[in-house]
């Protein structure tokens, strides 16, 4: 899961496709232009022998726009490899304030961090 997040950050499509279960894998991946993934919070994860679930929040920035993608993702294991299956996704807007903590999680004020 964290490996897939890192792959989204770096646009490593080969890994993203390889770790996506063939039954639900899209034909190709698209990345929103100018969208940066800024932070990942995993709130819950568990698995049995061959199914797993991960609840996470991923914070993104696109210029002055920010948001959080929340997902309850499902994974399945085949031949010892975990694959992303699908997930329930919801979106939340974020409105960072210049004198408050930056949503990227750096601990710095927004105006001294990711503010464009
Ligand atoms: Zn920041």
Image (cartoon, rainbow, N blue to C red):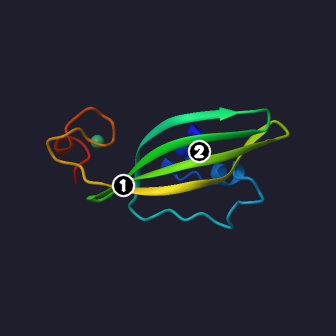
46 vs 90: above or below: above
Percent position of residue 83, x then y? 72, 46
Taking the view exactly as shown, the residue that stands out farthest to the right is: 79
39 vs 8: above or below: above
Q: Nearer the viewer, mark 2 or mark 1?
A: 1
Q: Secondary structure at mark 1?
A: strand
Ligand 1: image quarter: top left
Percent position of residue 54, x then y? 60, 40
Q: Distance between the Cα atoms at labels 2 and 1?
A: 19 Å
Give the crowd class for mark 2: few <14, some 14-19, many >=20 residues within 10 Å. some
Q: Secondary structure at mark 2?
A: helix
* Front-most of residues 98 and 88: 88
Percent position of residue 91, x then y? 43, 57
* Front-most of residues 104 and 86: 86
Taking the view exactly as shown, the residue that stands out farthest to the left is: 99
Residue at x-position 70% and y-position 34%? 47
Quadrant containing the N terminus in the rendered view: top right
Quadrant containing the C terminus in the rendered view: bottom left
Return the mark for residue 39: none
Q: Identify the residue position indicated by label 2 in the image.
A: 4
The quarter of the displayed image where residue 76 is located: top right
Percent position of residue 78, x then y? 82, 42
Residue at x-position 33% and y-position 36%? 105
Q: Is residue 46 left or right of residue 103?
A: right
First in sequence: mark 2 vs mark 1: 2
Return the mark for residue 67: 1
Residue at x-position 55% and y-position 42%? 55
Q: Is mark 2 within 8 Å of ligand 1?
A: no
Residue at x-position 23% and y-position 42%? 113
Taking the view exactly as shown, the residue that stands out farthest to the bottom is: 27
């Amino acid at each position: 899961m964290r490996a897939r997040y890192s792959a989204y950050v770096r646009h490593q499509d080969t890994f993203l496709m390889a770790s996506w279960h063939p039954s639900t894998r899209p034909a190709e991946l698209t990345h929103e232009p100018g969208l940066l993934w800024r932070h990942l919070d995993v709130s819950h994860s568990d698995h049995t022998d061959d199914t797993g679930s991960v609840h996470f929040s991923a914070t993104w920035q696109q210029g002055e726009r920010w948001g959080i993608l929340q997902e309850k993702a499902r994974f399945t294991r085949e031949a010892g490899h975990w694959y992303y299956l699908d997930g329930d996704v919801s979106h939340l807007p974020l409105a960072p304030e210049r004198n408050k903590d930056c949503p990227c999680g750096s601990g710095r004020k927004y105006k001294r961090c990711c503010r464009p």
